[in-house]
Image: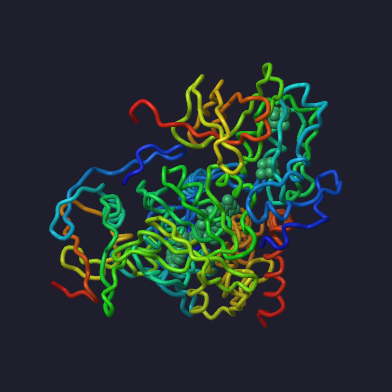
Amino acid sequence: MSAETRRPEDRGPSGARRPGPSEALIRTGLPSAEDLERVRPSAERLTHGAVAVLECFQRIPCDPCASSCHHGAIAAFADINDLPSMDAERCNGCGLCVARCPGLAIFIVDEHHAPGEALIKLAYEFLPLPARDQVVTALDRAGREVGQARVVRVQRPKEKTDTPVVWITVPKDLAWTVRHIKVEVSHGA
Amino acid sequence: MKSVEIAVVGAGPAGLSATLAAAGQGASVALIERDEHLGGQLVKQTHKFFGSARQEAGTRGVVIARRLGQAVREQAGIDLRLATTVLGYYSDKVLYLEEPDRLAKLQAERAIFATGASERMLIFGNNDRPGVYGAGAVQTLMNVHGVMPGRRVLMIGAGNIGLIVSYQLLQAGVQVAAIVEAAPRIGGYLVHAAKVRRAGVPILTGHTVKEAVGEEAVEAAVIWRLDEQWRPVPGTEERVDCDVICLATGLSPLGELMWQAGCRMAYVPELGGHVPWHDDDLRTSHEDIYVAGDASGVEEASAAMVEGRIAGLAAARSLGHDRDVEEKLGEARRELAALRAGPTGEKIRRGLESLRQGGDGR
Amino acid sequence: MRITDHPILDFKPGRLVRFTFEGREIEGYEGEPIAAALHAAGIRVLRRSPRLHRPRGFFCAIGNCSSCLMVVDGVPNVRVCVERLREGMRVERQEGHGELK
Ligand SMILES: Cc1cc2nc3c(=O)[nH]c(=O)nc-3n(C[C@H](O)[C@H](O)[C@H](O)COP(=O)(O)OP(=O)(O)OC[C@H]3O[C@@H](n4cnc5c(N)ncnc54)[C@H](O)[C@@H]3O)c2cc1C
Ligand code: SF4
Ligand code: SF4
């Protein structure tokens, strides 16, 4: 099926031309620099704090991100197969969409959380959940260890079937690298 | 012999939706499922589904199974028969049933077959070793029975099933050595691929498994690279330490009952193999028989639910239960078309096209 | 190898019961498929094939493929991936086509 997934005519809801996933992404599962560039909020917007980054590059029949956002930052889908279209100006980084996206493809990034430190909110569906203030291993998109992260908050859902969201801080230069964490099994478990 | 208006065979998302739609129109329905629980494939699916709100997007398969199952139990006019296998469909519209301790017959004006699909085996050396398991088996073992299928798994197939089951293995605390895919590209959704990649699982496209290693059970696998013509490249063999080789190499529609009932079948590779010819109402060439879900062509649970609704509504309408039925059918057809409109639906669209042409029921 | 803690699912096993495998006593949960109980105890070879005596385990786990035929309480050809475990069952590996004992 993947032969059809890259089509130059792939469009976002606005009808604007937006390229499909790169060849490298389809081959390896890792987005290329160009893929990532397309979903990165403007430098201007990044100076204003937390914002959602939708790492969703392929047209699939999926749209819960749009309805999960109460700020109108993710446009309603004209065609359920559209790529999500983000208005970063309307996004306040609340993170509601992070737990709702079935692709676990949304991350909140705040480059200016603290001097030299970025905040990342990510969906984490593994056990054990980290504790607040725990230092965990920071992983990149290929699962490589790239440094350490400090857990600043763990949003546990009411229902076990919903998705926990973990807030971590990392050195600012890792804000666009870290996308997962590894939590050491501690206290004799 | 007991009789009903509509018999639905299989209680996966397609069968449950068909049952609810038909009973909602006022038809008397028997829902027959060989398992002891409702939900079909959904009961093993711990991940969140795609689609849109109408198809419960963002909800996990297990939760959808619970909701649909509850709705069926609460709806009046449904004769629920669990642990009952349909063995055959005979003239006079009679279904032969195998109940836990006896055989029985059921007469039904219309039958809807929502029997799902079965997993495909892959040919390689020692593929009969204990530890070579189908992806469905791995899911059943870990997500239904709470037993780890092994310590370290090699996954074969980077379609959605291979990607998702790999993720579920990681969630259950099982290591995934790698995902091996013969095609040069990842077939499943790239967001699923990203989830397993960032958890450290490599995806080796253009590779396949050569053989399983181990005298009594799997102790390792040998994989090798494929060239552009899909021929293995000697000298590229690599040993992968694992105790399970999990096959996620595709599904074939389960059409035996419809073969036997005399429905006209057609071979359509895009739909997974032999499927009954059917029209937009999911009616087969046999005027009393409808089909829905993976049995009509391997697709997705979201599409299976909508197909079930269409088949249930159309079967009820054919028996005179036609309250608001055109409106409901129209809505369902639009949903189905929307689901299939994108690039990932292209294969299904092509398959249905070729079914309509090659498999014409007349 | 049981899953004790799962991020999404809660398992509600039945009562712990004893049964025998090749004369050895092991434990499993009542009502789970025999194959699941055996697998949890690390037993993966369920029978030997009729002609070449190759070891076999289960494959589909839903009663379709007949890869997991065993002798249960003396009855051959039981598909243990769907047959439910009860207290005191005698489970044995099947050699070839199996014989009624
Ligand atoms: C790992 C995996 C992940 C998936 N992820 C997604 C996803 O994210 N989104 C999505 O939309 N879809 C997904 N799917 C696909 C989806 O599960 C299937 O497309 C869907 O379950 C098909 O529904 P169905 O009702 O046709 O068949 P099934 O769910 O297979 O149900 C068929 C039922 O019929 C019963 N049956 C069969 N024969 C008989 C008989 N003779 N007598 C009585 N009963 C019988 C079976 O026991 C079964 O319960 C996934 C599938 C797998 C395996
Ligand atoms: S972070 Fe909040 S405001 Fe921003 S897109 Fe997500 S839900 Fe909308
Ligand atoms: S919900 Fe997630 S996977 Fe679905 S379209 Fe939105 S960003 Fe993509």
Instruction: Name the spot of residue A128 as percent of width and height, x first.
Output: 44, 32
Looking at the rendered structure, the number of numbered marks drawn on it comes to 0
Q: Is residue B7 visible?
A: no
Between B93 and B349, the one nearer to me in the picture: B349
Q: How is the image coloured?
A: rainbow
Q: Which residue is farthest top? A: A115
B293 or B321, which is in the foreground?
A: B293
Q: Is residue A108 visible?
A: yes
Asked if residue C45 is positioned above or below residue A153 in the image, the reply reads below
Give the residue at x 41% y 51%.
Answer: B152
Q: Quadrant of residue B266?
A: bottom right
Vertical order, A156 against B300 (above or below): above
Q: Residue B350: x percent and y percent? A: 71, 69
Residue B224 image point, x, y percent? 52, 66
Image quadrant occupied by the N terminus of chain B: bottom left
Q: Is residue B39 above or below residue B94?
A: above
Q: Nearer the viewer, residue A179 or A82?
A: A179
Where's residue B14, x and y in %? 55, 58
Which of B327/B44 is in front? B44
State left or right for residue B256 relative to residue B280: left
- Which quarter shows the C terminus of chain B? bottom right
Task: Name the quarter showing ligand 3.
Answer: top right
Residue at 72% of width from left, 55% of height from top?
A23
Furthest residue in direction bottom, as rendered: B362
Q: Residue at x 16, y 60 (%)?
A: C22
Q: Residue furthest front?
A: B235
